[in-house]
C-alpha cells in the first residue's frame, strides 16, 4: 500500500504520535514488535534526589499518560496506521481508550482508522481534549483536522509549527510530508520531510514506504525501489512492505515480480485486506 494518507483524502486519513520530553533510559528497550514507540513522561524514582540533567535532545512527543500499558497500546495503534492495518488500529486504540478515555492523541489516531461518521466524532473529541494537552499534541490534532476540513492554509501553518515544536519527532516530519504530498502536491517538500524522518530514526520502517512513493511520484524509481528494500529489511514480517513492492513492480511493468510480491504479502498476513486486490491487478495485467 502506498500509505494511509494517500487513501486519506479519498476515504479516511493518516498520520501519527503524543508531551514533549525524551523517554528515560530507565524504561529499557521497547518490545521488538514496537516500532517508534511512545512513552509517558518519565517518573522520578527517588524524589529526594534530583536526577542528573540529560544531554539536550531535539524534542519529540511523549504521551500525556502515566500508564506504560496505555503508551504501548497507542504505539501499536500508530504503527498499525503506518502500515495500513486499520482493523488492528481500531482494536488497539479501543483498548487504550477503555483504560484511559481522556487521552486526546488516542482519539486523534482512531479518527484516522474509522469510518467517516465515527472519524468526525473522534476528531472532534480529540480537539476538545487537546485543550489541556501539550502544544505538540495540539498541533498534531489541529493540523490534521484542518487538512481533512480542506483548510489548507491553516493546515500548512500548523504542520510547519509542529515540526518546529518537535524537531526530533520522526512522525511529525512524516505528518507534514504526507500533507505536502497529498494536499499541496509538493513532492520535493515531501521527500525532504520523509528523508528527515529516516535521518531522525533510521529504524522507522514505514517512513521508508512514505519516502518510496514520494520518490516514485517524482519519477525516481530506482530511489523508490531502494527505499522499499529498506522497508522490507526493517520489517520482514510486514505484509504492507511486500504489497508496496508489488505495486511498485506494477508501475515498472514487471508483472511477474508483482504477482510474487503480492503473494508474499498474503503469505505473511492472509488477512491483509488490500493485498488480494493488488494480486488481482497483477494477474490481470499478466493476462492470467
Image: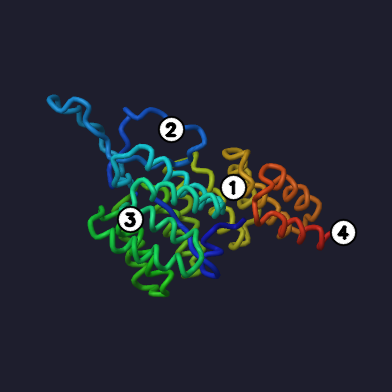
Distance CA(mark 4)–CA(mark 2): 45 Å
Within-10-Å neighbours for mark 4: few <14, some 14–19, many 20+ = few
> Residue drawn 53% across and 49% down?
88
Which percent across, then down, holds residue 64?
Answer: 29, 47
Ranked by sequence position, the earlier of labels 4 and 2 is 2
Q: Is mark 4 on a helix, strand or loop?
A: loop
Ranked by sequence position, the earlier of labels 3 and 4 is 3
Ranked by sequence position, the earlier of labels 3 and 1 is 3
Mark number for residue 288?
4
Within-10-Å neighbours for mark 3: few <14, some 14–19, many 20+ = many
Mark number for residue 30?
2
Q: In this view, does 67 lie to the left or right of 201?
A: left
Q: What element carries label 1?
A: helix
Judge whether 179 appears above or below 22 on screen: below
Mark 3 lies on residue: 104
> Residue drawn 48% across and 63% down?
13
Within-10-Å neighbours for mark 1: few <14, some 14–19, many 20+ = many
Report if the CB atoms under discs 4 and 2 are less than 8 Å apart.
no
> Residue drawn 72% across and 56% down?
276
Q: In this view, does 256 lie to the left or right of 8?
A: right
**Along the viewing direction, whichever of 162 and 252 lies nearer the viewer:** 162
Mark 1 lies on residue: 227
Distance CA(mark 4)–CA(mark 1): 30 Å
Please name which of the two marks, 3 or 1, marks the residue nearer to the observer.
Answer: 3
Amino acid at each position: 500500500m502506498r500509505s494511509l494518507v494517500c487513501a486519506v483524502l479519498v476515504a479516511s486519513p493518516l498520520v501519527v504520535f503524543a508531551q514533549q520530553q525524551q523517554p528515560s533510559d530507565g524504561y529499557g528497550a521497547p518490545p521488538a514488535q514496537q516500532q517508534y514507540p511512545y512513552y509517558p513522561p518519565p517518573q522520578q524514582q527517588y524524589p529526594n534526589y534530583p536526577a542528573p540533567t540529560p544531554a539536550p535532545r531535539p524534542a519529540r512527543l511523549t504521551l500525556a499518560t502515566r500508564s506504560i500499558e496505555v503508551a504501548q497500546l497507542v504505539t501499536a495503534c500508530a504503527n498499525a496506521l503506518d502500515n495500513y492495518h486499520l482493523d488492528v488500529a481500531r482494536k488497539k486504540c479501543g483498548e487504550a481508550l477503555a483504560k484511559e478515555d481522556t487521552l486526546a492523541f488516542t482519539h486523534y489516531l482512531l479518527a484516522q482508522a474509522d469510518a467517516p461518521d465515527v472519524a468526525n466524532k473522534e476528531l472532534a473529541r480529540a480537539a476538545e481534549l487537546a485543550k489541556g494537552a501539550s502544544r505538540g499534541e495540539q498541533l498534531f490534532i489541529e493540523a490534521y483536522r484542518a487538512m481533512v476540513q480542506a483548510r489548507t492554509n491553516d493546515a500548512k501553518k500548523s504542520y510547519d509549527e509542529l515540526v518546529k515544536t518537535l524537531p526530533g519527532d520522526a512522525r511529525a516530519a512524516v505528518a507534514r510530508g504526507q500533507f505536502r504530498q497529498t494536499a499541496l502536491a509538493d513532492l520535493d517538500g515531501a521527500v525532504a520531510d520523509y528523508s528527515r524522518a529516516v535521518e531522525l530514526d533510521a529504524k522507522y520502517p514505514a517512513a521508508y514506504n512514505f519516502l518510496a512513493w514520494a520518490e516514485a511520484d517524482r519519477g525516481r524509481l530506482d530511489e523508490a525501489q531502494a527505499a522499499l528494500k529498506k522497508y522490507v529489511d526493517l520489517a520482514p514480517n510486514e505484509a504492507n512492505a511486500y504489497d508496496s513492492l508489488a505495486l511498485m513492480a506494477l508501475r515498472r511493468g514487471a508483472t511477474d515480480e508483482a504477482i510474487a510480491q503480492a503473494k508474499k504479502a498474503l503469505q505473511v498476513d492472509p488477512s491483509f485486506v488490500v493485498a488480494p486486490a493488488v494480486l488481482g491487478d497483477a494477474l490481470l495485467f499478466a493476462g492470467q
